[in-house]
């Protein structure tokens, strides 16, 4: 009796170049996830800041609203910095390189 032929497109599990299990360090996973989340938060913070400046320039906000907005954005920036430092990340760690498009976060 002959053995059945392997299906096309399927590899023999023994011939894989990818390890069967992945050694994952909990700290590096947490750091990577924190970096990703903080990158998104920082991008949104910068976009909100630019939008706020546009609205201020157009005169669409009262003095109290400008004050509240400024305090809120400063508190958010401070918290992002605290979290970034807690996880041992630098500002450059949050600026993902998009290849030909350049860095994700605009430089201030």
Image (cartoon, rainbow, N blue to C red):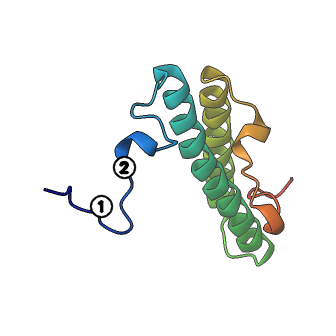
* Chain-order first, disc 1 or disc 2: 1
- So how many labels did they put on this image? 2
Task: Provide the secondary structure element on which disc 2 rests.
Answer: loop
Q: Secondary structure at mark 1?
A: loop
Q: Residue furthest left?
A: 1
Q: Residues within 10 Å of mark 2 (few under 14, many from 20)?
A: few
Of residue 58 and residue 85, the one placed in the foreground of this image is 85
In what quadrant of the picture does the N terminus appear? bottom left
When asked about the image quadrant of residue 6, the answer is bottom left
Residue at 74%, 48% in the rendered image: 95
Residue 25 placed where, x, y %? 49, 21
In the picture of the structure, the residue carrying the numbered disc 2 is 12
Where, by quadrant of the figure, is residue 80 drawn?
top right
Q: CA distance from mark 1 to mark 2?
A: 8 Å
Residue holding disc 1: 6
Q: Are marks 1 and 2 in contact (CB under 8 Å)?
A: yes
Name the side, left or right, on which 65 lies relative to 96.
left
Instruction: Please give left or right for residue 25 compared with residue 78 in the image.
Output: left
- Identity of the residue drawn at 69% across and 42% down: 74
Image coordinates of residue 36 in percent, x first then y, are 57, 44
Camera-nearest residue between 21 and 89:
21
Residue 41, image x, y percentages: 58, 49
The residue at 66%/55% (across/down) is 43
């Amino acid at each position: 009796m002959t053995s059945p032929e392997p299906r096309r497109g399927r590899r023999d599990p023994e011939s894989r170049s990818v390890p069967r299990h992945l050694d994952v360090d909990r700290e590096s996973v947490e750091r990577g996830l924190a970096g990703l989340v903080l990158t998104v938060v920082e991008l949104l913070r910068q976009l909100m800041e630019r939008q706020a400046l546009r609205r201020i320039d157009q005169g669409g906000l009262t003095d109290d609203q400008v004050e509240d907005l400024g305090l809120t954005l400063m508190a958010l920036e401070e918290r992002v910095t605290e979290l970034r430092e807690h996880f041992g990340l630098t500002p450059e760690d949050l600026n993902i390189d998009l290849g030909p498009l350049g860095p994700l976060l605009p430089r201030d």
